[in-house]
Every structure is written in C-alpha cells, then in structure tokens.
Amino acid sequence: MSNVSYYTQEGLDKLKQELLDLKTKGRADISKQIAEARDKGDLSENAEYDAAKDAQGLLELKISKLEIAVGNARVLDESTLDTSKVSILTTVKIKNKKNGAALKYMIVSEEEADLKAGKISVKSPIGKGLLGKKVGEIAEVSAPAGKMEFEILEISY
C-alpha cells in the first residue's frame, strides 16, 4: 500500500536533508559510540555497548521510515492549486464562530505541520474539517475541546 504524501518543495528538501544527515553524521556517531564501548572490555556485561547497539537499531529504523517517506513524496505545484475550495497546500483564513477570532492556516502534510508557523496537518481535526469547503461555508470540526464552527473567509495559495 502506497502512502503518498504531498509536500512543498521546501518541505521535501528539509526531509531529504534530514535523511542525508542521519545516513552520514548519525551513522558515524553511532559507530564511534559502539567502538568506544567495545574498547571497554567484556561485551556480555557492557551496558554502554548494549545502549549503543539499541541506538543504532533506532537510527536505522528512522532512516528506513524517512526513505519510505521520501520515496512516496510528491511535490505540489502551487500555481496549479484550485483555490475555489480548501485543499492541501492552500492557505485558508477562517473565523471562529464562537469567539469571532480570525485565524490563517496553511494546510500541509502531517510531516510539515508546524502550528507556530501557521501550518496545520491535513490529518488534524481542523484540517479534516476544512477540506473541500468553499468561501462562505461553515466547517464543523470535532476537536478534543468539543465541537467548533469555523466560517471560511478566504482561500489562497
């Protein structure tokens, strides 16, 4: 089963850089830790060696997951986005119907989500609730805090 994820070019470049760093610097650091632990004697009772080997396994798992993510990544061309409705990589301005607060979010893949930067995941409750909505429509979102209503004010890319 293929889990295609859509990214901005910036997001994909960041993912590729992280993968490269883990493959080079990360693997070198782990090898050094294993060598240092091995030099300390009997491996059967060496907790440092066991910890370093465990860390190596976790690093390789993370590298494997990132390789899959990069392999399934697709870059969306923002100039071809349909801004008549909310979709991934669109920026949407919404108004909370309860308190009148206006918010602006970019809908991105789960890996690129960063609330401080105004990027919310397409798989988050708000992201899911906004998808497919048009300007003027009301999105009902079931969030952990309860049911929320947002009016779509503007959609752009």
Image (cartoon, rainbow, N blue to C red):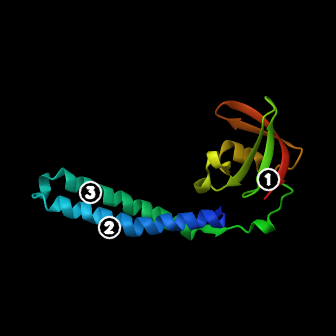
* Relative depth, front residue between 103 and 143: 103
- Left or right relative to 106: residue 36: left
| Residue 38 higher or lower than 113, as above or below | below
Residue drawn 73% across the image and 48% down it: 105
Q: What SS does tag 1 mark?
A: loop
Residue for point 27% across, 58% down: 53
Q: Earlier in the sequence, mark 3 or mark 1?
A: 3
- Of the pair 24 and 74, the residue shown nearer to us: 24
Q: Residues within 10 Å of mark 1 (few under 14, many from 20)?
A: many
Residue at image mark 2: 28
Q: Quadrant of the N terminus?
A: bottom right
Element at label 3: helix
Q: Secondary structure at mark 2?
A: helix
Residue at numbered disc 3: 52
Identify the image quadrant of the C terminus.
bottom right
The amino acid sitting under disc 1 is Val
Where residue 6 appears, as percent x and y from the top left, is: 66, 63
Tell me which corner region of the image, top left, top right, bottom left or bottom right, holds residue 147.
top right
Q: Is residue 2 visible?
A: no
Graded by Cα atoms within 10 Å as few (under 14), some (14 to 19) or many (20 or more), the crowding at tag 2 reads: few
Question: Residue 72 at x, y = what percent?
Answer: 58, 68
- In this rendering, the label closer to the viewer, 2 or 1: 2
The answer to whether residue 9 shows anywhere in this view is: yes
Give the labeled residue for mark 1: 86
Q: Residue at x 58, y 56 (%)?
A: 111
